[in-house]
Image (cartoon, rainbow, N blue to C red):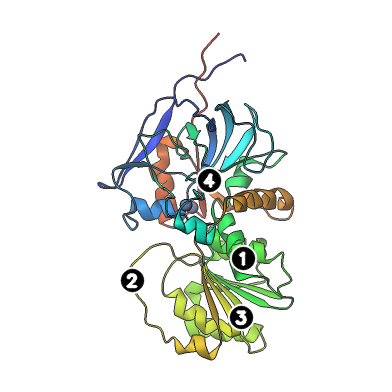
Amino acid sequence: MSGIAIGGGMQAVFNMDSLTLTVEDAPHPVAVPGGLIARVTLAGVCGSDVHRVVGHVKDATGRVSFGHEAVGVVEELGDGLNVDWGGLPVSVGDRIVWYAGSAPCGKCRGCRTTGEACDDRQWPLPSAVPNAAGYRDVASLSPLVPFFRVDGPVTDEEIVAFGCALPTAIGGQRRLGQIEPGQTVVVQGAGPVGIAAAMVVSLSPARNIIVIGAPAHRLELAREFGASSTINLDETSAEERLARVLELTDGRGADVVIEAAGVPEAFPEGVSLLARHGRYLLSGLYSGTREVSFNPVQLVLKSARVFGNLGSRPEVGLQALRFVQANRDRFPFSRIVTHRYELGSIAAALDAMQDGSAVKAVVTPRPPARRTA
Ligand SMILES: [Zn+2]
Ligand SMILES: [Zn+2]
């Protein structure tokens, strides 16, 4: 090689106690046995990062690292590592995608009883530990971090565009079960989770895919990603939205409602939109203590089923990658990425996600420093 990268570069550190974000020097990590070192080329900003930065989610203390949607290039392989989590050979120089945060441990009670809800899963990770978080120049993946080799012409932006929203949508549909021909699906929310859900459902035999959200430019994107109709949340009342859904379903209501709005008020409305025997998937609520009033008899009268959806098995990450690779001519993935920042401007990236101006913000590290030969 003509140039060798030097130094560990920079990393973003968030203090969970003082709610402050800094970008600091980071030591260059060394690959642990069974793990690897990757140079980050692109990292997605997830809404859950924003929840922590503003103090809505307090699931860690002290200095932590963020960025759980990353693409990069393998720089060093630890002893014993030669295949990715899909079983494909992996070498230095290969492009990979990973979802930082450890895989299910396979040993705890949660893992043994559910196969995916690990009690020991740690995220976010302390910043002092070399870790796989994506808001840094160089990441260290432990043997517990699932990663997948990326081949072919798919771009980093296409992969990161939906970030963890795509595994969320794919994993959510697994929980829901099959969508039958002719069924109507309503998606509440037009952020990455809602648009990804509409996109995944659009490959099913559903008759209508109705996305409720705002503002107009997000609904336009939702139509490009498979929505057959959209309803602007800002311009309609709950009664008008119900009337529209009934109109589109011959008075029956939605066979499936997918909540991707992230606010508790969506719940009673979602139940009101359900047809009899409908299924309701809660995919977007991630934090919060706010309560809403709700009459549960509706669930009984409709014989409805409600599913919660958090987390997914590591192989869903591979399914998400394969989905993007197989459908990049069908859907304009990179149009989801509306805002791009360098690592040093990570705070602005989080702001753009928080105020809703960005559908998806991404962070690019600096180009690697090179030693002149
Ligand atoms: Zn996420
Ligand atoms: Zn476990």
CA separation in Å, label 3 and label 2: 26 Å
Residue visible at 47% across and 38% down in the picture: 132
Question: Which of marks 1 and 3 precedes in the sequence?
Answer: 1
The residue under label 1 is 173
Residue visible at 47% across and 73% down in the picture: 234
CA separation in Å, label 1 and label 2: 27 Å
Question: Which of marks 2 and 3 precedes in the sequence?
Answer: 3
Among the 4 quarters of the image, the one containing residue 289: bottom left
Question: Which of marks 2 and 1 precedes in the sequence?
Answer: 1
Q: Nearer the viewer, mark 4 or mark 2?
A: 4
Relative vertical location of residue 135 with respect to residue 190 in this rendering, above or below: above
Q: Amino acid at mark 2?
A: Arg
Q: Amino acid at mark 3?
A: Ala
The local secondary structure at tag 2 comes to: loop
Among the 4 quarters of the image, the one containing residue 128: top left
The residue under label 2 is 290
